[in-house]
Amino acid sequence: MGKKGTGKLELPQDTHKSGFVSLVGRPNVGKSTLINHLVGEKVAIVSAKPQTTRSVIRGFVTIPDKAQIVFVDTPGIHKPRYQLSEQLVEQAMYVLDEVDWHMFLVDATAPPGKGDEFIAKALGNKTKKTFLLLNKTDRVPKHDRDRYLKDYQALGEFADVLMISAKHSQGLEGLKERLIENLPAGEAMYPEDEYTDQTSSMISAELIREQVFRLTGEEIPHASSVYIEQFETRSENLTYIGAVIVVERPNQKAIVIGKNGLKLKEIGSAARTSLQHFLGTQVYLELFVKVIPQWRNERNRLRQLGYNRDYSK
């Protein structure tokens, strides 16, 4: 599990607070960026391409003797086209009934779309325990930031509405304070020096997949996945990782490898930098590319690749 130093936010009351807060929204509205900035560590990979998040991700913020917020990032809710897509939407919908509060993230640069309306409908009466967050306000002139505010407010009876910029951490301290005010009394659920329930192997696979998303064209990212075959600490300052990039067709494999293996080397070099920063050691990374036809539409394959339907874990 990831570990970190503790936070500095001060609370006026003596009662310890703790609870789960979901993060929902359409694909590509900035959910992963937001959870990373709220937690203060990278717990979710970030890409300009939609549908990057493929699992329920928990990140913790702990203020010793005061509060612990467990943020639950969900895959973007969208119209599914594959078994994988169906599972992603199911995960997001399941979380709605399992948390104390919700954060509904929307794009302040555009009016509500059908996806926003669908999520608001899914929340139903839960909007009363939902913070509506208008994100990307850094991209909107100050005089125009509330341009679509009434349209978004009309989607539900929200507990509060905040203007934020996840990318620049604007408004996030105030958001955490408002959340803590509303969390139920309770003890911390996770050790205060941990910031996520993901294993080092799981995060490593995601960091590699992030570079596949970043460095390949439109077709490859959504047809690809990454799993770790071997994760081994070989010395105090060296970690060996053997990882497999999965694609659906031979021509996709050729694209990922590239001419003379150059694209795969580029992916490996960028991933190694991220992995070394995350693990705090030197990393010996070996990447392999494997074709598994139609893996996104086969439930057994999805399970083998770690897309588990037990979203409570």
Image: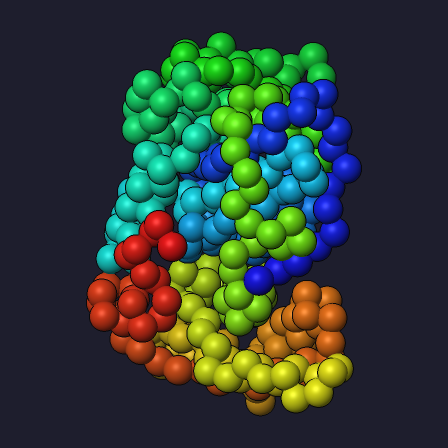
Q: Nearer the viewer, residue 255 or 177?
A: 177
The image shows residue 283 at horizontal and vertical percentages of: 68, 80
Q: How many marks?
A: 0
Q: Vertical placement of 144 versus 41: above or below?
A: above
Residue 26, image x, y percentages: 43, 37
Q: Is residue 191 above or below residue 101?
A: below
Q: How is the image coloured?
A: rainbow
Q: Tell whether 20 sits left or right of 281.
A: left
For the point 39% across and 78% down, the residue is 251
Nearer to the camera, 197 or 63: 63
Q: Residue at x 53, y 16 (%)?
A: 160
Within the image, what quadrant is residue 273 found in?
bottom right
Question: In percent of the image, x 30 and y 66: which residue is there?
Answer: 302
Vertical position of residue 270 compared to residue 59: above or below: below
For the N terminus, the image quarter is bottom right
Q: Does residue 297 appear to the left or right of 3 in the view shown?
A: left
List x then y, in percent, for residue 110.
51, 25
Q: Is residue 205 visible?
A: yes
Classify 277 as above or below 268: above
Give the position of the C terminus as an image quadrant: bottom left
Give the side of residue 166 with respect to residue 293, left or right.
right
Q: Residue 122: x and y, percent?
A: 30, 28
* Quadrant hosting residue 95: top left
> Does residue 134 appear anywhere in the picture?
no
